Amino acid sequence: MLKKIPFLFVVLLSCAPLFSQIRPIEIVEEAKANRLFLYALNKNEQDLDVSITVEGTNFRQSKGVPRAVRVPAASKVLVANLIVDRGKRANYTYELKVSDSLSRRALRKEYEAIKIAPKKKVIVYIPENCASCDTLVSNLDNSRYLYTLYKFSEKPELKAQLAPAFANAIVKIDSVTAPIISLGGVLHVKIEDYDQLLEEMNK
């Protein structure tokens, strides 16, 4: 498997506010035969245009001027294809230009959907008798978001750990028939469907 020496990771952003609003684009590599493919991972909830300039030794690449590539929200897109010299190891550095001002001239390539962390960490606890849990879990599985799932039937110790939070509540933990959801560390017992979850997540 081809490997590279430590490389320089430089991200050039189109405007200063981007730093506080957008997670940096990540570049990951995949080697196949004498090819080294560089992919951009966009772990944001908005589309971005990304252009990459790769320099180094022991490889060849297209001589054209780098063009911006549209990297949709929560996706992985091929942005560079290096042909590695036989018996060599590609040594490279790269620079990225990332823009949230989407251009009509940006290349549209095939992309792979990826899971991303939501604005608030999501943990779902499933009580023993939960009528709406299957639908909620199915929607989360089909969403772009990472989340953690626990079932009281499999981890009864978690139920005991959460019980103190219900000590002064009208409904006790043994009577809960809806999913118990932690959003950013705050417990919710009135979220029964995915739309409600998104609404609370984005508050």
Image (cartoon, grey):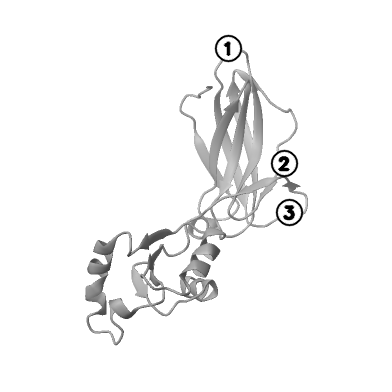
N-term mark: 1 or 3: 1
Labelled disc at residue 67 = 2
Tell me where residue 86 appears, x and y as whole percent: 62, 13
Tell me where residue 101 appears, x and y as whole percent: 67, 57
Q: Which residue is mark 1?
A: 87
Q: Secondary structure at mark 2?
A: loop
Tell me where residue 80 appears, x and y as whole percent: 65, 34
Q: 10 Å neighbourhood of mark 1: few (<14), some, or many (≥20)?
A: few
Tell me where residue 116 appears, x and y as whole percent: 51, 55
Q: Is residue 47 above or below residue 85?
A: below
Q: Residue at x 77, y 49 (%)?
A: 105
Q: Nearer the viewer, residue 28 or 111?
A: 111
Q: 10 Å neighbourhood of mark 2: few (<14), some, or many (≥20)?
A: some
Labelled disc at residue 103 = 3
Residue type at tag 3: Ser
N-term mark: 1 or 2: 2
Labelled disc at residue 24 = none
